[in-house]
Amino acid sequence: MQPLGWGAPLQWLALGWQDLKAHPAIGLFYGLAFWGMALVLGLVFANKPEYTMSIASGCLLVGPFLAMGLYEVSRRREAGEAPSFASSLTCWRSHIRSMGMLVLVLIVLELLWGRASLVVFAVFFNTGMPSTTGVIQAVFNPENIEFVLVYLAVGSVFAALVFSTAVVSIPMILDRDTDAISAAITSIRVVYEHPGVLLFWGALIASLVFLALLPAGAGLVLVGPVLGHATWHAYRASVRWLEEADAATP
């Protein structure tokens, strides 16, 4: 585990921006893919809300593979190699077993999160299940303040668990082809060692994604690739392998 300062997340974003500027066409492809996922989720929620969780699970399955392409671009740049669109699309093939296991873990966590949310709705929501047109008004009805507090508390626990499991595990699998369990444990250790810095990083991610979603999600075309590249640099700054440390020692 490497020491991290409070300014590290901002440095990761700056490095991610540099990677995007160096290969904008590749980044644009992945940004459009992220935007497309957001549009599909929005359409499903507006027309068939009962299928939203299923589509979200599908996005959770596809998302890591898309992000892995961005990590590959950053990895190649760091290694002095020339990134290519083809290599970014196929980099996951040699890591499919570990990636599949990690994605399965994330899907299970999301399903548990969804089930917990339904239980919270059933127990604490006092004004009847809201429709898609009036969900904001219903949720923030003063009669439902207890629901809001419990829902946020439960959601925070699951969000922290998912974030801790995934924050550096996928780039680690790409870099070292480690197994999913070792990658997830290392990711949790990174958060445990630097909870304040990683909380700041998570807040930055959430804030940027929220802002990117405001203009019909179009901001994801830019924010998505920057965050993808930045996540690679977060991994590289957080974890130092023994042979790398030995090579850096004079």
Image (spheres, rainbow, N blue to C red):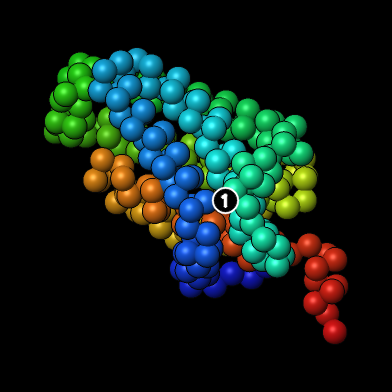
Query: Which residue is identified by label 1?
Result: 70
Locate residue 124, reporting x and y percent. Answer: 29, 23
Residue 45 figure quarter: top left
Residue 217 figure quarter: top left
Q: Amino acid at mark 1?
A: Leu
Locate residue 23, reporting x and y percent. Answer: 52, 59
Q: Nearer the viewer, residue 239 or 41?
A: 41
Looking at the rendered image, the quarter that the N terminus falls into is bottom right
Report the number of numbered marks.
1
Locate residue 198, reporting x and y percent. Answer: 52, 58
Residue, far bottom: 250
Q: Nearer the viewer, residue 3 or 66?
A: 66
Residue at x 58% of width, y 60% of height: 234
Residue at x 85% of width, y 66% of height: 243
Q: Is residue 223 left or right of residue 141?
A: right
Residue at x 52% of width, y 37% of height: 63
Q: Is residue 108 visible?
A: yes
Residue at x 21% of width, y 22% of height: 132
Mark 1 neighbour class, 10 Å CA radius: few under 14, some 14 to 19, many 20 or more = many
Locate residue 174, reporting x and y percent. Answer: 70, 48
Q: Nearer the viewer, residue 84 or 206?
A: 84
Q: Is residue 13 above or below residue 181?
A: below
Q: Secondary structure at mark 1?
A: helix
Looking at the rendered image, the quarter that the C terminus falls into is bottom right
Q: Is residue 92 above or below residue 172?
A: above
Q: Is residue 6 visible?
A: no
